[in-house]
Amino acid sequence: MSNQLFDINTAYSGHVQDIGWGPEVRNGVGAGTTGQNKRLEAFKLKLEVPDDLEVKVMKRAHVQDFGWLDPVYEDDDICGTVGLGKELQAIQLQLYGKDADQYEIWFQLHVENKGWMNWMSGGELAGTVGLALQAEDIRIMVFKKGVSLKTDGVVGFVEYVAPPAKDPVVDANMAGKYFSWAELACDCIKPEYGFGWCDGYPEQDLKNQNAPYLIDILDRLREYLGAMIIVTSMIRCGDCNDHWGGIQGSYHTTWQAVDIVVPGFSPYEVAVAANKLTGCGARYYRASGFTHLEPPGCGVYCQE
């Protein structure tokens, strides 16, 4: 039952959009798909444990529109949903039983727009919550304690919590304490470009849905740094995003990303300060000299 590397084998299968249940795989092999944009909807997991050991596993799933489901414990239990067209977004696995303290379970999700996230271990959460991103593949292994699969600087779980609603801003022209709507608007309203694809604020409902998170970050960062912040790009309509070479589905088109320059501070210093202050994701572009802020997830890293 065991081999040279694994005292306890993991055997699991995934239920994938348009495919159904895939074959049972073992010990760290992927049980879903990558590069096909197909959601992982559920999985089954059993442990192959030597007769002289008592180690079992608790499985729990976070599912689109349902949130965290009740834990399941048996080998044939489905963790997630089947036949509802709902994406699996996050999981939690934990060993239990008389000998469980000798071992650790490791699990990893491949997530839409993020790729393989970090390995997480027993009791931790893997994947995303609140970002509407589907898990697409899953890997699971069990080792004796003392082994770590984590990679420094790689995120394994992200939860986005929307900030509380703010009191209405008295000046309708101001988006926040320091920033006007004109500063944040799509380049379509700027006469120097003359694009005219939108009125500067496509999808108006996003003003209250997504914009408050970034505006709060900008206001807090302005006070923290005590310096002027120049917004180079926040809101983009689809045509404007294409014109500037933005990626498909860019956070800029859903009012969830902002590019800024802070005179007197390097892009790296701005990224670290914003992440430390608010927990937002921050990318800094040394060559281009700006910092990109977005919802939690990417941490702080350089992107040329």
Image (cartoon, rainbow, N blue to C red):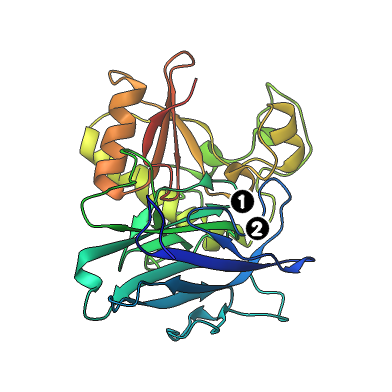
Residues packed near mark 2 inside 10 Å, few (<14), some (14 to 19) or many (20 plus):
few
Give SS at disc 1: helix
Residue 282: tell me if it is visible.
yes
Occupied quadrant, residue 83: bottom right
Decide: marks 2, 1 in contact (CB < 8 A)?
no
Nearest to N terminus: mark 2 or mark 1: 2
Asked whether 131 or 181 is in front, the reply is 131
Image point 37% across, 67% down: which residue? 167
Q: What residue type is labelled 2?
A: Gln
Residue at the image position 44 percent from the left and 49 percent from the top: 214
Tag 1 residue: 254
* Residue 10 in the image, given as x and y percentages of width and height: 46, 65
Q: What residue type is labelled 1?
A: Thr
Q: In this view, does 276 lie above or below 233?
A: below
What numbered label is drawn on residue 204? 2
At a point 57% along the width and 49% down the height, the residue shown is 255
Q: Which of 260 and 230 is in front in this view?
A: 260
Residue 33 pos. (x, y %): 67, 53
Q: Which residue lies furthest to the top in this view?
A: 287
Residue 65 is left or right of residue 195, and the answer is left
Name the element at disc 2.
loop
The answer to which of 144 and 190 lies nearer the viewer is 144
Left or right of residue 222: residue 187: right
Give how far across and how far down residue 261 sits, in percent. 41, 25
Report if residue 160 is visible in the image: no
Quadrant occupied by the N terminus: bottom left
Which percent across, then down, holds residue 158?
41, 56
Number of residues whose C-alpha sits closer than 10 Å to that of mark 1, classed few (under 14), some (14–19) or many (20 or more):
many
Establish if 129 lies above or below 282: below
**Closer to the camera, 78 or 89?**
78
Residue at mark 2 to residue at mark 1: CA–CA distance: 10 Å
Indicate which disc residue 13 carries.
Answer: none
